[in-house]
Image (cartoon, grey):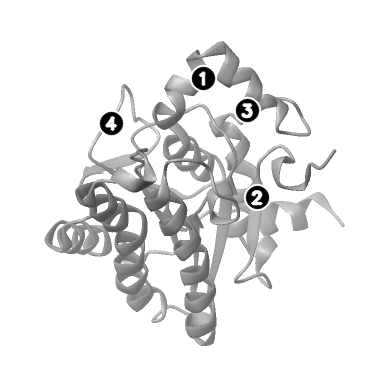
Amino acid sequence: MTRSILDRLFSLEGKTAVVTGAGRGNGKAIAEGLVSAGATVIGIDLFFENDYSTHECLNCDITKKEDLNTALEYIVNKYKTIDILVNNAGVSYPNNFLDYPEDSWDKTYEVNLKAPYELMKMVAKNMKDTASGGSIINITSLNSEMAFPNNPAYVSMKGALKQLTKSASLDLGKYNIRVNNIGPGYFMTEMTRNSWEDQEKHDARASKTVLNRWGKPEDLIGAAVFLASEASSYITGQDIYIDGGWLIKGL
């Protein structure tokens, strides 16, 4: 296989990508990675850090349909098509199961499950009218496979998002729209900062992996570019776990 074929397979030149939760952490790394592969990227978030010279950023509350409509109308008017959607934004509100607050459950549902569902529907309507279709990547979690303590809403919504991806991949395949999941393990983000800074918890989580370390946001770039590009043109409805081997580790 020549280098030119590899370049073509993994190139995102001429593609427009929307990445939610792109203001920091994993979403920012994914956005920058897609840009490095040639895509034009629009990041959507409520919070943005520092310099974003690599991609455009839109302030948007993804739990509000009017915000989503405004953002997507702007993107389509400016860029004509949306070829790639990465549903990365997520929240986590740990609490004891028996005392779990209803508002924490509702907010987790709104951000982690309903918003990706609404965005997939909206973006797929644009993708289906293009000859090349599109690629949708949902960011799930180890928690779509495994229960972690005192976080029933997060575990539930990530598990549901995993299955929503499979449902969408079946229904949208006829439009040449592929839908896949990336499931990160323990990554250093704002969501996990307390565990990262607690040496005992930090070491305990690292020891759960085969590679004996936490994930870094840039560890997600390769899989994101792969699933967004023609290199994965015959892959849909699948789960790729980037977890350092956490899921397979036995004794």
**Local crowd at mark 4 within 10 Å, few (<14), some, or many (≥20)?**
some
Marks 2 and 1 sit apart, C-alpha to C-alpha, by 20 Å
Element type at mark 1: helix
Disc nearest the viewer among 4 and 2: 2
Residue 237's spot in the image, x, y percent?
Answer: 60, 71
Q: Quadrant of the C terminus?
A: top right
- Circles 2, 1 touching at the beta carbon (< 8 Å): no
Q: At x 28% / y 52%, what residue is drawn?
A: 105
Q: Which residue is mark 1?
A: 196
Marks 3 and 4 sit apart, C-alpha to C-alpha, by 28 Å
- Nearer to me, 100 or 153: 100
Residue 175's spot in the image, x, y percent?
Answer: 49, 84
**Residue farthest toward the bottom in the current orientation of the protein:** 174
Q: Earlier in the sequence, mark 4 or mark 1?
A: 4
Q: Which residue is mark 2?
A: 241
Disc nearest the viewer among 2 and 1: 1
Type of the residue with mark 2: Tyr
- Nearer to me, 20 or 162: 162
* 213 sits to left or right of 15: right
- Circles 3, 1 touching at the beta carbon (< 8 Å): no
Q: At x 56% / y 20%, what residue is drawn?
A: 201
**Residue farthest toward the left in the current orientation of the protein:** 66
Marks 4 and 1 sit apart, C-alpha to C-alpha, by 22 Å
Element type at mark 3: helix
Marks 3 and 1 sit apart, C-alpha to C-alpha, by 9 Å
Q: Which residue is mark 3?
A: 205
Q: Earlier in the sequence, mark 3 or mark 4?
A: 4
Marks 3 and 2 sit apart, C-alpha to C-alpha, by 16 Å
Type of the residue with mark 1: Trp
**Local crowd at mark 3 within 10 Å, few (<14), some, or many (≥20)?**
some
Element type at mark 2: strand
Type of the residue with mark 4: Phe
